[in-house]
Each structure stands twice: as C-alpha cells, then as structure tokens.
Image (cartoon, grey):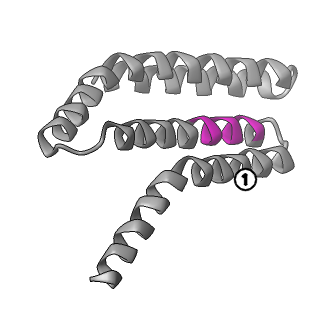
Amino acid sequence: MDIVKIASICIVSAVICKLFDKNAREYSLYIKIAAAVMILAFVFIYISPLIESIRTIFERSDADGDYLKILFKATGICYISQFASDICKDSGENLLASQAELAGRVGLMVTAIPLFEQVVEIIISFSQT
C-alpha cells in the first residue's frame, strides 16, 4: 500500500485546513472531504486483492456465497457510516454524526438478520437431537 502518499495527503491537507480555519472555515471542510475521497480512492486500488483473497477462502471452505455478500455489505455499511459521522463531527454537527452512527448500526443489524436466522436454526437442530 502506498502509505507515504496517503500520509502526505493527510499532512498537506491538515496544514491547508489550519490556514483556512481562521478566515474561511467552510473551505477547510471542503479540503477535508476532498482529501478523504482521494485517500479512499487509494484504498480502493488495494482492496481488490483483499476481496479476491477472502473470496478464495470462502470458495475453499465451501461456505454459502450469501455469507460473503453479507460480510462485504456489512463492512461497507460500517465504513460509509463512519465516514459520514467523521465529516459531520469535523463540521461541528455532533447530532448528525450520532445519527449517522445510529443509522450504520441499524443497517448492520438489518444486514446481519440472515446470519442470526442461520445461527438460530443451528441451535434448534442441536437441541432436537
């Protein structure tokens, strides 16, 4: 992973944001969002091999492919809600940040319902034997 580029983006963005903090605070938020999107783009470049590794593990384990979809969807929900929450916190909107986190938690629970159902079915099958 090109951590040097990512660290450079973070440092340069932080310095620029400090310059704008006193006079034009709204530009600081735009710079933070732009930096976050650029970093996210770098991360997506390196996420493809990770996804393939996880997919290979699931194929070898003979696990249901739906579980992999649930795993990726849950991970996406976590990242997106955390990103939204952090942006809201940076802009001083703590209530909105809390709501973004709550929405992420609820979305995660809804996404995980098929896994909970499967666990309950396994427990029931063990108790009947």
Q: Quadrant of the C terminus?
A: bottom left
Q: Is residue 52 magenta?
A: no
Residue 120 shown left or right of residue 126 in the figure: right
The residue at 42%/27% (across/down) is 7
Pick the front one: 72 or 40: 72
Residue 30 in the image: state x and y as whole percent: 74, 18
Task: Say whether residue 52 is visible.
Answer: yes
The residue at 60%/55% (across/down) is 109
Pick the front one: 82 or 24: 82
The residue at 12%/39% (across/down) is 60
Pick the front one: 57 or 18: 57
Query: What residue sits right under mark 1 in the picture?
Result: 102
Q: Vertical placement of 71 versus 24: above or below?
A: below
Q: Vertical placement of 5 versus 124: above or below?
A: above
Q: Main secondary structure of the magenta part?
A: helix
Q: Quadrant of the N terminus?
A: top left
Q: Vertical placement of 39 versus 54: above or below?
A: above
The span picked out in magenta is 80-88
Residue 58 in the image: state x and y as whole percent: 21, 40
Pick the front one: 107 or 7: 107
- Residue pushed farthest left? 60
Task: Say whether residue 2 is visible.
Answer: no
Residue 44 shown left or right of residue 19 in the figure: left
- Say which amino acid is labelled 1: Leu
Residue 36 in the image: state x and y as whole percent: 57, 24
Residue 120 in the image: state x and y as whole percent: 44, 69
- Residue pushed farthest front? 128
Label 1, secondary structure: give it.
helix
